[in-house]
Image (cartoon, rainbow, N blue to C red):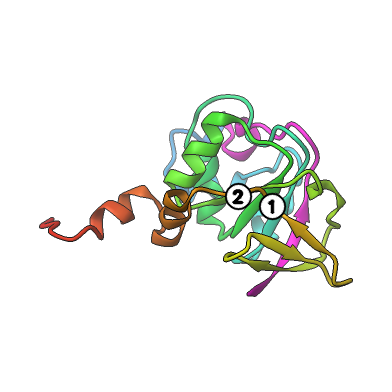
Amino acid sequence: MSTHRVWKFGADIDTDAMAPGAYMKLSIEGIAPHCLESVRPEFAASVQPGAVIAAGPNFGIGSSREQAAAALVQLGVKAVIAPSFSGLFFRNAFNLGLLLLTTPDAEHLAEGELVELDLQTLTLTRPSGKHLQCEPIPDFLLAMVAAGGLMNQLRQRPGRTA
């Protein structure tokens, strides 16, 4: 298990907030410093690798831009915990190696709280000792996250020559 700082966000955080349109012509290194600036201007400059985002329902709604999940990965976000996710964002996140955890209790996590994440049981443990159980994730998606995303997973396949 590892310990992670919580960054708290509300409901309906859209992909345009994570990857603002004004920066879409830039590389992911250019987009990431603007991630979530419309909601939390200090986020990109202050987030530390290994942090987790706790959000309300519908995280990742909006356009299908994969740069939204890529910006979070670039900033070192370990996981996003929410009651629900946009389907397109869900798939993009796992394809890029970003863990998404679904639990109706995500909104009970507090800003700055340190939580332990057990990837074996998909359980979050709060400082009070209370456990938040997350919904099961198929093994193939967990393997994709462990590999750092789909492309890395494909590169690691036996018999791959390139």
Residue closest to the eye, 73 or 139: 139
Q: In the image, is residue 103 part of the stretch drawn in magenta?
A: no
Per the rendered image, the range of residues in magenta is 1-20
Q: Residues within 10 Å of mark 1 (few under 14, many from 20)?
A: many
3D distance between C-alphas at marks 1 and 2: 6 Å
Q: Which residue is labeled 1 in the image? A: 134
Residue 64: x and y in percent read: 51, 27
Position of 84 relative to 8 (above/below) = above
State the mark number for residue 155: none
Residue drawn at the location 25% of the way across and 60% of the way down: 156
Amino acid tagged 2: Pro
Residue closest to the eye, 138 or 97: 138
Tally of numbered discs: 2
Q: Report the quarter where the C terminus lies.
A: bottom left
Amino acid tagged 1: Cys
Q: Are marks 1 and 2 in contact (CB under 8 Å)?
A: yes
Q: In the image, is residue 2 part of the stretch drawn in magenta?
A: yes
Residue drawn at the location 69% of the way across and 52% of the way down: 134
Q: Residues within 10 Å of mark 2 (few under 14, many from 20)?
A: few
Position of 125 relative to 62 (above/below) = below
Residue drawn at the location 64% of the way across and 35% of the way down: 85
Position of 88 relative to 44 (above/below) = above
Q: Is residue 96 left or right of residue 89?
A: left
Q: Report the quarter where the N terminus lies.
A: bottom right
Q: Which residue is labeled 2 in the image? A: 136
Q: Is residue 94 left or right of residue 62?
A: left
Residue 21: x and y in percent read: 55, 29
Residue 8: x and y in percent read: 79, 51
Residue drawn at the location 78% of the way across and 45% of the way down: 9
Q: Is residue 92 left or right of residue 130?
A: left
Farthest residue toward the top? 63
